[in-house]
Image (cartoon, rainbow, N blue to C red):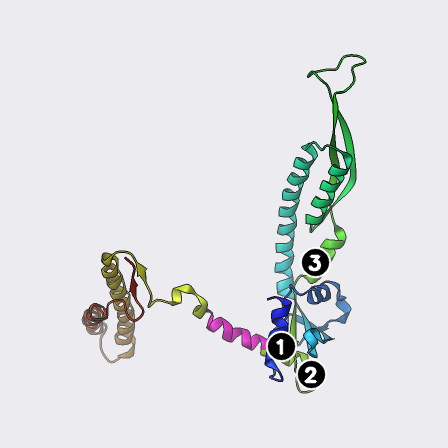
Amino acid sequence: MLPSECQENLEALGKTPWISRVPATIAEAQQLMQTLPPEMFTVSSLGNYAIAEVCSTYAGVRQRWLVVQSESRQQADLKQLDKRIAKAKTKQAKALKDLSAHPFACETDALDAAKTLAKKLKYHRLTDIEVQLKPHYERPGRPRKGESPKRYTYHLQATLVLDEAAVALQRNQAGRFILATNLLDDELWSNETILQEYKNQQSCERGFRFLKDPLFFASRMFVKLPQRVAAGRHDYGVMFAGLQHRSTTTSLLFSRGNRNHSQSTGEAHRATHTAVGAAMKSVRAFGLGVGSKVVD
């Protein structure tokens, strides 16, 4: 989410109480997570968490920012960080090797190329940067005594090393996230209460996550041939029948304890056939359901 969009959302909420997670892409939040010292955190009674409270007036709205440190997430983030550093080292080492083999027309061009590469480095930096002059003669092989070079090319030489300061900031950020709220009364809304409310909110969001899944739109199918429509109806019938079979079998086998096992099993099979017939009849009657569409 862009900062401008965050500001518009905050203004639209007005005085409505809210608890939200601050995007890590916001410069102020990123700097806070990377530079906040460990001694400012207080261990939470919720377990596995430590919290540091910071006041903020982001987007012109006064709010409380809670920097939360998760121990379990910190370990996972550090492992991912090590993988990213190793991957970046391999990629940038190859880029430096290719750059060193590239001939430049002048020393300035070589140094400019080094600056361009250095700006792309996130976890590393270039040291021992120098430009070497390579002579080229008219004929290949060893030059004759006293022969002057026909032209010169400039080649960049540098060493790729780990940027300890940049990596330290990334390690400080590992396992941290920021919660923002306009609930300023810390006696009524303690830091732990806000964190718990956010965790409860997450559980609800996970429960409805399937709504965002494209597969949730099962009532819509886009096919090119009418034969595919018939095949789709058959698949739906089998699916419905399978669901009815599981439900009916479980009900008959475990809900009627006063009957013997063989009798319940027989009833389950008869009920399954009935469910299959009803499901297929329903599918044939209604086709693919509301919202179906056939594309020629």
Per the image, is 201 magenta?
A: yes
Quadrant location of residue 96?
A: top right
Residue at the outermost bottom position: 188
Amino acid identity at mark 2: Leu
Quadrant of the rendering where the C terminus is positioned:
bottom left
Q: Nearer the viewer, residue 172 or 288?
A: 288
Identify the disc placed on residue 10: 1
Query: Mark 2 = which residue?
Result: 184
Amino acid, disc 1:
Leu
Is 111 in front, or is 55?
111
219 is higher (above) or lower (below) than 227: below
Task: Tell me the element at label 2.
Answer: loop
Q: Earlier in the sequence, mark 1 or mark 3?
A: 1
Characterize the local packing of mark 2: few (<14), some (14-19) or many (20 or more) Cα atoms within 10 angstroms: some
Question: Where in the figure is residue 212, as x and y percent of width and height?
Answer: 45, 68
Residue that badge 3 annotates: 171
Mark 3 vs mark 2: in front: 2
Residue at 24% from the left image edge and 62% from the top image edge:
234
Q: Mark 3: few, some, or many residues within 10 Å (few <14, many ≥20)?
A: some
Magenta span: 198-209
Identify the mark nearer the N-term, 3 or 2. 3
Which image quadrant is residue 29 in? bottom right
